[in-house]
Amino acid sequence: MALIETEEAARRLSRAIASDLSLYNEDKIVEGVKGDNLFTVLEGEIEEGRALFRSRVAPELFEKNFYDRAIIDILVRSKGHVESVMW
């Protein structure tokens, strides 16, 4: 399979991976937001997604942090309604 070479496609992939994490780990995400330890609770899942993203995109696109931004947008911002000391 060819590596993704465009920023738009890399963004879409990063958001798709983050969306899957959100879909399949809803309880853990809520727990992590409430406990202010989201990245500890989901460390394995986030790193697995990062490895997948790295394997699918050109190295210069991986360095642009699309995956990290998608994690914040989808896993953190979407849980703004959950009571937490983070906000």
Image (spheres, helix red, strand yellow):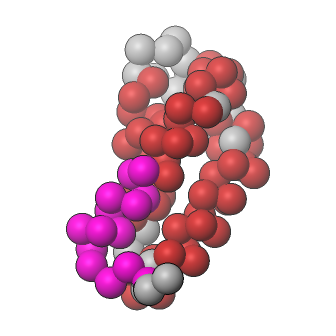
**Residue 17 percent coordinates (x, y):** 50, 52
Residue 82 visible to the viewer: yes
Picture coordinates of residue 80 (x, y %)?
Answer: 41, 22
Q: For the magenta stretch, what is the residue range?
A: 3-16
The residue at 49%/47% (across/down) is 18
Indicate the quadrant where residue 4 lies: bottom left
Q: Quadrant of residue 3?
A: bottom left
Q: Position of residue 71 (x, y in %)?
A: 48, 48
| Any part of residue 70 in sight | no
Q: Which residue occupies 39% across, 51% down?
A: 15
Decide which of 29, 84 is in the foreground and name it: 29
Residue toward you, 44 or 81: 44
Q: Is residue 61 left or right of residue 21?
A: left
**Which quadrant of the view contains residue 5?**
bottom left
In depth, the one of 39 and 12 nearer the eye is 12
In the image, is 76 to the left or to the right of 4?
right
- Image: 65 above or below 30: below
* 41 magenta-colored: no
Q: Residue at x 49, y 37 (%)?
A: 75
| Magenta stretch: dominant secondary structure | helix
